Image (spheres, helix red, strand yellow):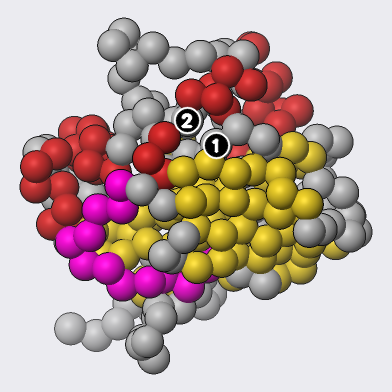
């Protein structure tokens, strides 16, 4: 079958480098868990009662991905651009209605990510019952490190931290996730046919805050790696 003809060149495939491989990992979708550490839910004024609530998610376009180490302009239409340091789970096998017991079968590996957020716009959307897209789906707003292959591995415990110009702003442990890796995969697979290349940003711990042009961010997850971002001047 011949390739279809397009009116203009199709957009490039969003992809991430993979540790130890020359091939890049093609990214399918970006899912993000909301309010998945208790102390962060409290600082956002929305504590979570796991016995009464289900996990919730939002999405960011794969086109918002930016590689670790990039310098990104301070984005438009915000005065409160926030970092959120997160462990990113990379799906490597398809799955629909996957049990928590079998969730590890979908894991390809992990990465370190920054779910950058126009907090002012997100909070307006939240209060007015509008979608979060303008607050979350930000050009160059999904920073991601190289992917570390760890097939079938469930990270249950790992130190996670973020420094802004050398000062620690976030410090927690993956063991404090409200919905853990197995639960996130199982629950998200009730809504979506998960596919290879789906990224799941698993949520941020407490300590989120605003950046200003010139800031240099370094996030780490024990056993995974680091992610870096420099905030440039506004365009
Ligand atoms: Mn987040």
The quarter holding residue 77 reads top right
The quarter holding residue 215 reads bottom right
What residue is rendered at 64% in x and 43% in y? 170
> Do the CB atoms of the residues marked 2 and 1 lie less than 8 Å apart?
yes
Q: Is residue 31 visible?
A: no
Determine whether, in the image, residue 219 is placed left or right of residue 92: right
Q: Position of residue 187 (x, y in %)?
A: 23, 33
Please state the extent of the stretch shown in magenta in the rendering: 142-156
Up-down: is 207 above or below 111?
above
Q: Nearer the viewer, residue 31 or 84?
A: 84
Determine whether, in the image, residue 45 is placed left or right of residue 156: right
Q: Position of residue 107 (x, y in %)?
A: 23, 59
Q: Position of residue 219 (x, y in %)?
A: 61, 58
Q: Is residue 149 visible?
A: yes
Q: Nearer the viewer, residue 177 or 128?
A: 177
Task: Provide the residue designation for mark 1.
Answer: 205
Residue 37: assigned label: 2
- SS at mark 1? loop
Q: Quadrant of the N terminus?
A: bottom left
Determine whether, in the image, residue 76 is placed left or right of residue 144: right
Outermost residue toward the bottom in this view: 22
Q: Quadrant of the C terminus?
A: bottom right
What residue is rendered at 59% in x and 70% in y? 67
What residue is rendered at 22% in x and 60% in y? 153
Residue 211 is one of the magenta-drawn residues: no
């Amino acid at each position: 079958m011949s390739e279809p003809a397009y009116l203009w060149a199709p957009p490039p495939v969003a992809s991430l480098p993979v540790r130890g491989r020359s091939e890049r990992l093609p990214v399918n979708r970006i899912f993000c868990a909301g309010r998945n550490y208790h102390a962060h839910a409290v600082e956002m004024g929305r504590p979570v009662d796991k016995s009464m609530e289900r996990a919730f998610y939002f999405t960011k376009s794969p086109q918002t991905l930016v590689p670790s180490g990039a310098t990104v302009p301070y984005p438009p239409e915000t005065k409160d651009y926030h970092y959120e340091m997160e462990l990113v789970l990379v799906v490597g096998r398809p799955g629909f209605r996957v049990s928590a017991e079998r969730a590890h079968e979908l894991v390809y590996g992990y990465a370190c990510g920054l779910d950058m957020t126009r907090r002012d716009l997100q909070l307006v959307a939240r209060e007015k019952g509008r979608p979060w897209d303008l607050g979350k789906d930000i050009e160059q707003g999904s920073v991601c490190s190289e992917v570390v292959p760890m097939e079938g591995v469930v990270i249950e415990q790992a130190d996670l931290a973020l420094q802004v110009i050398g000062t620690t702003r976030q410090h927690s442990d993956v063991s404090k996730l409200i919905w853990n890796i197995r639960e996130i995969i199982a629950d998200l697979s009730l809504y979506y046919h998960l596919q290879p290349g789906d990224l799941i940003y698993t949520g941020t711990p407490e300590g989120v805050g605003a950046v200003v042009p010139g800031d240099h961010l370094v996030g780490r997850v024990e056993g995974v790696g680091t992610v870096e971002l420099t905030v440039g001047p506004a365009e």
